[in-house]
Amino acid sequence: MKWKELEAEQAKDLTYKVEVARNVITKALNISHRPALAYSGGKDSQVLLDIVRRFFPESLNRLAVIFGNTGVEFPESLKFAREFGSELNCEFHEARPGKTDEPSYKYAGQKRIFDRLIADGKISEVLKPDGKLKSTDALERACPPYLREELLRERLIWPAGTMMSYWWCADQYGWPLLGKSWSLLDARRINIDTFLRFSQSSSDSQKLLDYYFILRHVKISQHCCRVLKKEPSQRVQENLGVDLIFKGLMASESRSRAKNFLTRGYLFEGAKKKYLHEDPFYHCQPLAIWNTEDIWNYIRTYDVPYSPLYDMTYISQDGSKQHIKRNGCLGCGTDFNYKDNHLSTLRQTHRSAWKSIMRAGMGQQIRNLQRAMKAGQMNIFDTVDTNELIDIQPCVFDDVDGLGGMSYPHDLIYDPEMIE
């Protein structure tokens, strides 16, 4: 399918799109022994699940619904998903983040070890010849015994069995702030610090140098998506022997999803899974040609229950009243470089949660970003404490001046060897 063909398909009516989805699901079920459906409690996966239940009731005895509970779900959607799941006539599994196997240092503790090794002239013991950190483990093993006792007393060590939560991810990797192109280096914060300090980061690319400049000031990462969403779901899939996963993804959501659909289609074979041995693993996206209007038309047509989250409202920056449009993680700031982003909406609809996230560190990273983008120009972030700024109205944390829709391209050259 080409772009114009996709646009033509997207312009067709709901009846046609439902029929296409049914045909796609039929093909998928015919090649799968153990299908599963990725469920978030949001409107898109709710509609997809309704189509399967409504038109393929005979498949429910082998269908597993996997609800990804990241630990930072909207309370309305979490309650709705659990109540709805308890009433399903098929398996309902809640995927939760994993736990650490060994004790490990918090970022502040890793920084202390890092600085101590530099002061003692021993930093080379944990560096590769090119100046990158050998590994986070190597750094932590080099911690002097007396310093370890200090860090234990100051509670700067994560104990074994710590859930790899949103807060753990933010501490170890960085905050989910700005889009994927700003998180090219999927490495722990201490690894990036080491890279920027000791490795050769000069370049002829001004875009790359600008990217390094931002990384020196702001701890950005989307590693939480892997730890909170992808890996928990994969563990459940492996335990169940799943060989096909249904997803409520739509090409209209983003250009990257559109390109994915145009390249792979509705049903495609994914990476091999060890637990399936030589058997294939499939991905299926029956709603690929749908859009948000189609989702709501289907919900109204078939009287489909949905999360009360979508009935909540906020005032957009143009002064109009808007309903919440998307489900997702409470603390996600990946769209922060756009107006009416997730965090600015959260401030109005779930203010206590917004304050907790901002005071835990997101506010300081936004402050750092604002100051970096100002390039030395005096602004309110230079004169007022972060916690005081959180209570100022109108809110200065809703977006960053000068960012607009700015994003860095995915073709930036970087060194993947710094990743553990």
Image (cartoon, rainbow, N blue to C red):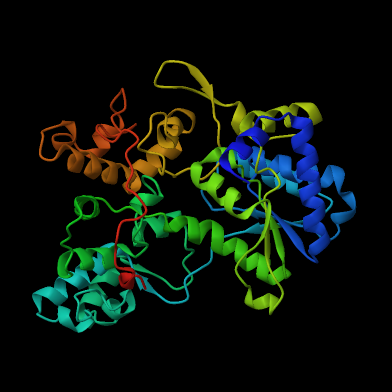
Q: Quadrant of the C terminus?
A: bottom left
Q: Is residue 6 visible?
A: yes
From the viewer's side, name the closer residue of 1 and 44. Answer: 1
Residue at position x 47%, y 58% from top? 165
- Horizontal and vertical percent position of residue 108: 26, 62
Residue at position x 51%, y 68% from top? 99
From the viewer's side, name the closer residue of 234 and 155. Answer: 234
- Horizontal and vertical percent position of residue 64: 75, 58
Residue at position x 68%, y 62% from top? 282
From the viewer's side, name the closer residue of 368 and 420. Answer: 420
Q: Is residue 311 above or below residue 35?
A: above
Residue at position x 35%, y 60% from top? 173
- Horizontal and vertical percent position of residue 131: 19, 75
Q: Is residue 333 left or right of residue 265?
A: left
- Horizontal and vertical percent position of residue 84: 74, 44
Residue 97: quarter of image: bottom right
